[in-house]
Amino acid sequence: MKILVAEDERVTRRLLERQLEHWGHDVLAVEDGAQAWNQFQQEPFDVVVTDWDMPHVDGRELIQRIRACDSAGYVYLIMLTGRSETTDLVAGMEAGADDFLAKPFDRNELRVRLRAGERIIQLERNLAARNQELLKANERMKGDLEAAAEMQRALLPESLSDVLGVHFAWHYEPCDELGGDILNVFALDDQRVAMYLLDVSGHGVPAALLSVTLSRVLAARHAASPACLGPDAGPHVSGAQAPALVAGRLNQQFPMTSNNGRYFTMAYAVLETDSGCLRYVLAGHPAPILMRQGLCPQPLTGGGLPVGMFDDAEYEEHRIQLRPGDRLYFYSDGITEARNEQDAMLDTEGFMKFIEESCEHSIQESVANVIRRLRRWCEPVSLADDVSLLAFELPG
Amino acid sequence: MSEVFDQQALMERVDGDLEFLEETVEMLDEDCPDLLRQIQEAAARVDAEGLVGPAHTLKGMLANFCATAAETAARDVEMMGRENRMVDVEAAVTALENETRGLRDALHEFLEAAQR
């Protein structure tokens, strides 16, 4: 080990130096704390053996300086003290010394104290190496998560979507790197637009993996329906156009027993752009909020079981006739269950108030405004769940 | 008469290396007069605080030679300084001078005998 000895009394210093060198250590012996501090700043030492009473910089000051500085590895500090000087010993240990050695030092005592120091230094080095490995692993995982989050974001619709003349806007904000929510909008043909917002139970990677899978399945269903739904979809009901059928099929395909107990809630709807007829299914999901001009916002009717929870769950399709100018807001419970500093929940009423107060804005601004208000309402508390909001306005 | 220093303990301390012992005795010869002078001057000034440092250093140095009486004499002077008990300090300093002189003489005699 590389050992720095700070001792103003020459004989003790020389005896220590000789003994430590005899044991094979690389020793530098200096005559006061100031010299020791200078040397310590210039080169690393594993162990510092220091006297307590020294001119210029005393033992306490030296120990405090060493402990305060950002040295590469742990430095084991042994304080030299007179046999009767217990006050110095306590002060030295409090200042950061690891051990003490009474003067005149006993060789065997010095040897065992150094061995204890060596063990601690080795443990500290092992720990530092492990920490380094963990840091690297963490960075790698962080990189993987960022890549996964980017992939998940790539599954979301264009930022300002205008689908078959219908103005859509959305906001998606996972509470971790990855979210369990996912949403999308797509034209089924030149008259119908399908949309969904789903929320997988739990957070993090497992929930995100399922949400990404569901997004891919729903995209494939849209592209390949009705074939992917099977022959019983019927000749006139293409799978993606029948919300209840979509929910039922997903319920069969993704039972929670096959997904580590994960299920999901979903609002899925198909809008006929010409007539304004909206068919939808609510599978354990909060009912979308309808904002009709001149009226108060209100949730759509209907409900159903979450997807994947029960094998025999049946889903009911609901319909509503929308009018030009009507707005519909799909959302995840991360909004209504958000909590503020007083631990109060926003609830549906609070959310509808935000919507109502934003109705003079464009649909895009309305969505942005609702999220802004939500954030302000929660401050300084951060959002604890994924937040998703998908809204559209039927053109006049 | 008891030994001025514990010869066996001292030889163990230097691993039986007479050359090294001689080196440390030279250090004692070089540093001792100056430390004693500082102690004498502090005692003459009745400077309790000024007594502590050199007495403490000398005590540590003497202890390395397994010289209990000399170490005790240095400790007494140091404690007088720490506790500001300066009434009998001159006698204590004289005792320390005598013990130190005795030790140095004994160490030289020992080295000469051992090297013969």
Image: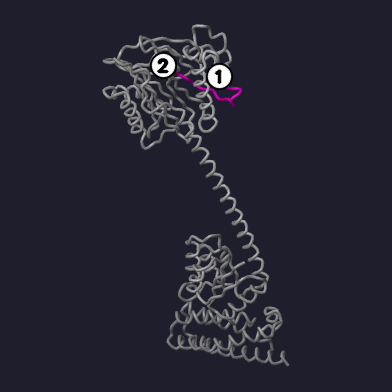
Mark seen at residue A309 = 1
Ranked by sequence position, the earlier of labels 2 and 1 is: 2
Quadrant in the picture for residue A5: bottom right
Residue B3's x, y, as percent?
A: 68, 86
Residue type (three-letter) at the residue carrying disc 2: Val
Quarter of the image where the N terminus of chain A is located: bottom right
Secondary structure of the residue carrying tag 2 is: strand
Residue drawn at the location 34% of the way across and 26% of the way down: A367
Residue A111's x, y, as percent?
A: 66, 68
**Measured along the vertical axis of the image, is residue B44 above or below residue A157?**
below
| Render colour scheme | one colour
Q: Mark 2 falls within which chain?
A: A
Left or right: residue A112 compared with residue B40: right
**Measured along the vertical axis of the image, is residue A142 above or below residue A251?**
below
Q: Is residue A361 visible?
A: yes
**Measured along the vertical axis of the image, is residue A356 above or below residue A233?**
below
Q: Mark 1 falls within which chain?
A: A
Question: Which range of residues does the magenta coloring cover?
Answer: A253-267
Which residue is outermost to the front? A190
